[in-house]
Amino acid sequence: MPAISNKGKSMPQSPIRKLVPFAEEAKKRGVKVFHLNIGQPDIKTPQVALDAVKNNTLEVVAYSRSEGSEEYRNKIANYYAKNDITVNANDIIVTTGGSEALLFTFGSIMDEGDEVIIPEPFYANYNGFSIASGITVVPVISKIEDNFALPPISAFEKLITSKTKAILICNPGNPTGYLYSKDEIKKLAQIVKKHDLFLIADEVYREFAYDGSEHYSVMQEEGLEEYAIMIDSVSKRYSMCGARIGCIVSKNKAVIETALKFAQARLSPPTYAQIASEAALETPQSYFDDVINEYVSRRDILIEELQKIEGVKVAKPKGAFYCIVELPVNNADDFAQWLLEHFELNGQTIMVAPAAGFYSTKGLGLNQIRIAYVLKKEDLIASVNILKEALKKYNG
Amino acid sequence: MPAISNKGKSMPQSPIRKLVPFAEEAKKRGVKVFHLNIGQPDIKTPQVALDAVKNNTLEVVAYSRSEGSEEYRNKIANYYAKNDITVNANDIIVTTGGSEALLFTFGSIMDEGDEVIIPEPFYANYNGFSIASGITVVPVISKIEDNFALPPISAFEKLITSKTKAILICNPGNPTGYLYSKDEIKKLAQIVKKHDLFLIADEVYREFAYDGSEHYSVMQEEGLEEYAIMIDSVSKRYSMCGARIGCIVSKNKAVIETALKFAQARLSPPTYAQIASEAALETPQSYFDDVINEYVSRRDILIEELQKIEGVKVAKPKGAFYCIVELPVNNADDFAQWLLEHFELNGQTIMVAPAAGFYSTKGLGLNQIRIAYVLKKEDLIASVNILKEALKKYNG
């Protein structure tokens, strides 16, 4: 019997995958499970996007251009212009989600064994994309005590080797909710220019910046044109995760030309989803205002309630819709499973993402979980109450 | 300025990519270009699939399951049962096109430097997927004189090394149109079992088998359960190339479990396209009967007309909708460009795919082109007439 690859064996499973059967069992027992574990928003997709697909007049669902339709790319460029990012259609390759954008980027700039430095905790699938691409993630630790701010530049410099090809940030961050300041982006710009590295920024949560803080893109930083690669996606912005449309944006011509070759090999991004995504660009500002207000009030109530629990530590997120929560437990993995297997409060329990999967350094994040505040406020309040009572029982 | 990767530099461009600007120039001059170069059928997508998307009631375009929805996978399994292929939903992972299915397969069974043996000429993007996956294509030559039948087993055995992990076939074949016989599949089954290799079969053209010949799938071959991996797609079957839905099918649990990890990392296949693909399974048989009749008559007229041209050699395809044509020219690449740049007949010309890009062995296929018979009959007749007159002038 032929064997699978070492690469395949090394591919990580999603941090919550092994909890799924326990959640299913709990539901079978009649327990209601609040899902704090996933980044699938409950927010409605903009009507203009839904309607565009319902009213489409395709008779042949044909390939689009490998780089995405010119019309759509022109419109994305307009959207960026409104966000103070000056690019044109030729700087953009439309991809099947942010996932494919990152895979093409890794393939375009890194060879087997090359290294990318990523502040941890980071989006767990960066591990999977790295292994699939044959490259190595080198983590630089950011801390809950600092709200997960950018680690000092000296910490990055200690990690740079001849194999280092890029620094990757997620801004605002999943799972931390941290929003990098203009000053922090400038520090990163300096270091990548000094060491001739790419700066990859996953900016899929751009719109989700709270408390009046402004998102500062790597694409806005002057002098960074040849170094900056932005990863983007419609998934969170328009609550259409299932569309699977993202893009790579860079002023570096060699990067775009190379990524295009990867794009050509897989033929085209999905056609229906491009119709939805193009229409979504017409979403009125009121939609975003409502969504942001909703997330801010969810965040505020979540953090307020969490801070009332003894022994719980939480950084107040400034963006996205996640937060990392430190719990008075030794092993959040066990605790998360126990919540589903052995606990209920008035017939309800919660599913959370153990945070160890968001760290690359062994032993970090063992007492942390990630909470996605993608549920309505009353459910968040009920969820935090369940967490409080569960901790009492678990530690009692 | 940071550099792109060697992998990126090695990624091949599509064999027709460099012809595209010449085709655009020709159109600007007012010349009508018949596109014989692409596998984008002009056939209408089944109404049932188009309607399902138009009538969808999604309010949140959410992620589907990474492996595809259970309902859709169950229905695919039923479709296979009708094709004498016995699998269940757990043997199937829904992917973003056949492209992603092949990428996940390569990642799951091969490590950097491993080898896959492929009869050439082969679908050019196999090269791109191989480079992206860090693996090496080892070609085994099939010949136009033999209609591109399976090369002798001894030719395969000469190429097997400790790095060989799989044999990959496309059946029916793009670009050859060759349909492997049951006997040929049995020969391949023997060799992969003897040498402990996987047999990957790209069967996206399954329905396009002509002249009463039956398609025999690697999934039908008894005793091959642990060795066979089938790549499939809705693109050609339902003329919905832009949907981007395919799948991996295997009875080998380790392969499916491993491919699932790659699928989880990229989250999910596109949701709208799954709606279309699920509905497409209800396409009435009359649709396929009409389509097959149309392709057979296109093929017949194409081959008949081509055979009238002096110095042209063509193998009669038994499946798919391509054929390889040998021309009385030294360099089909130059000829293809010349057709667009310098030739027209009554204001018309043709765009063809030079076949060298479908070969891995340097120097092979230089005098061959691939023709996709995805145009209506009168356009095919006009196209072959253009080819005939062009050859006279080019060689005159």
Image: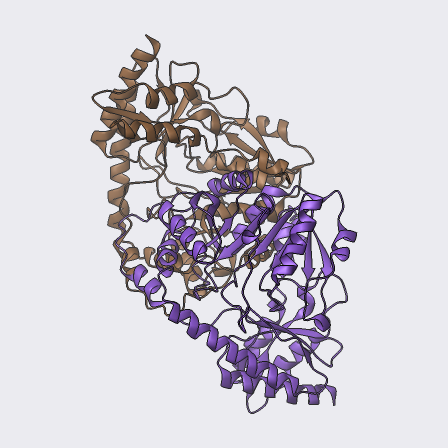
Chain colours: A purple, B brown
The image quadrant where one finds the C terminus of chain B is: top left
Q: Is residue A283 left or right of residue A300?
A: left
- The percent position of residue A289, horizontal first and vertical second, equals 43, 72
Q: Residue furthest bottom?
A: A346
Q: Where does the image place residue B112, in percent across and percent down from the top left?
A: 66, 41
A90 in relation to B159, above or below? below
Q: Is residue B324 left or right of residue B165?
A: left
Give the side of residue B219 with respect to residue A394, left or right: left
- The part of the image, by quadrant, that contains residue B60 is bottom left
* Residue B240 higher or lower than A16, as above or below: above
What is the residue that sits farthest to the top in this orientation?
B396
A263 relative to B275 in the view: left or right: right
Q: Nearer the viewer, residue B378 or B3?
A: B3
Measured from the top left, where is residue A24 in percent x and y?
A: 55, 76
Instruction: Tell which of A165 and A365 is nearer to you.
Output: A165
Number of marks in picture: 0
Res A238 → quadrant? bottom left
**In front here: A189 or B124?**
A189
Residue B326 at least partly seen: no
Q: Residue at x 55, y 87 (%)?
A: A382
Quarter the N terminus of chain B occupies: top right
Asked if one can make out residue A201 in the rendered structure from this viewpoint, the answer is yes
